[in-house]
Amino acid sequence: MYYEKYFSKLDEILREIQKTQSEAIEKCAEKMVETTLSRHRIYAVGCGHAGLLAKELFYRSGGLVTVNPIFAPGLELDVAPVTLTTDIERIEGYGATVIKRKNLQKGDFLLIHSVSGRNAVGVDMALEAVKRGVFVACLTNVKYSQSVSSRHSSGKRLFEVCSLVLDNCGDIGDAAVSFEGFAEKSGPTSTAAGAAILNAVVAEAVGIFLEKGVVPPVFMSANLDGGDEHNRKVLEEYGDLITYM
């Protein structure tokens, strides 16, 4: 069956991630812990479907309370026509403006998710954040990104302007399942693989907090008894690092 091809490919990709991305996952987790303990802020952003992983990271059970998503007009899938998102993420200067307006500061941490890494908004965000003394990491598909040209005037793609690169190890073009007699592929893997990578980073960060003798700032499911009280306390404790409340 066709879905079996998808699961087989996803399993292959997840194994490759475990094999090749361990060091980057550990470093990302360490940097997020360091950022929190120094009372600086963590941000996550992506355009279009890439933005789903910024949402995956914040305000969820088992997630870090200190992750702030960046949402900006035209970059989410809630605009009409939705093709505007494709146009807007190619506009040079907009990404830098978003970072300025969100007022990221020296010592903050920014994670940018872009599968191709070629569009102007992501590169602009990274360059502006670096200029401000922010540590910038990206989640991208390095093989895919290397196969395409940059749409930014610098000629740089996202993986070339970030201090830390997490590779989702997917196929060029993202979709991974081929069909006989049909030129196009289906079965994109970046969301599933990216979510696995980022939740692995969070789990690693929680472990590092504990090793340092710090109670990790983690959300408890609000649908468990005691969840509301736990979450209220942790939101209060880390309120100065939160921009989404």
Image (cartoon, grey):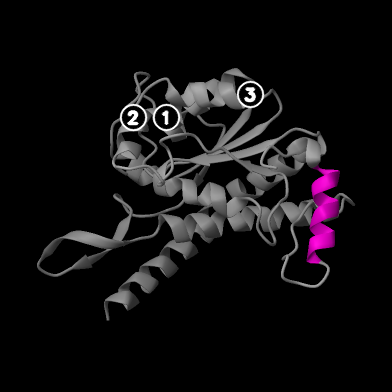
User: Residue 156, how many percent across, how many down?
Assistant: 39, 26
- Residue at numbered disc 2: 90
Q: Is residue 196 visible to us here?
A: yes
Query: In the picture, which quadrant includes the N terminus?
Result: bottom left
* Residue 204 magenta: no
User: Residue 34, how many percent across, how many down?
Assistant: 76, 39
Judged left or right of residue 207, residue 199 is left
Task: Report the residue at 48% width, 51% height from top.
Answer: 52
Task: Report the residue at 52% width, 51% height from top.
Answer: 53
The Cα atoms of the two marked residues, 1 and 3, are separated by: 16 Å
User: Residue 16, how many percent across, how many down?
Assistant: 46, 60
Q: Quick one: label 1 or label 3, which is nearer the N terminus?
A: 3
Q: Are marks 1 and 2 in contact (CB under 8 Å)?
A: yes
Classify 10 Å Cα crowding around label 3: few (below 14), some (14-19), many (20 and above): few
Q: Quick one: label 3 or label 2, which is nearer the N terminus?
A: 2
Indicate the secondary structure of the residue bearing disc 2: loop
Query: In the picture, which quadrant includes the C terminus?
Result: top right
Going by the numbered disc 2, the residue's amino acid type is: Arg
Task: Report the residue at 66% width, 49% height from top.
Answer: 26
Q: Quick one: label 1 or label 2, which is nearer the N terminus?
A: 2
Residue nearest the observer in this picture, 50 or 29: 50
Tell which residue pokes out farthest to the right in this image. 213
Judged left or right of residue 181, residue 27 is right
- Residue at numbered disc 1: 121
User: Residue 41, how many percent across, how many down?
Assistant: 71, 35
Going by the numbered disc 3, the residue's amino acid type is: Asn
Q: Nearer the viewer, mark 1 or mark 3?
A: 3
- In the image, the segment drawn in magenta is 227-238
- Residue at numbered disc 3: 103
Classify 10 Å Cα crowding around label 2: few (below 14), some (14-19), many (20 and above): some
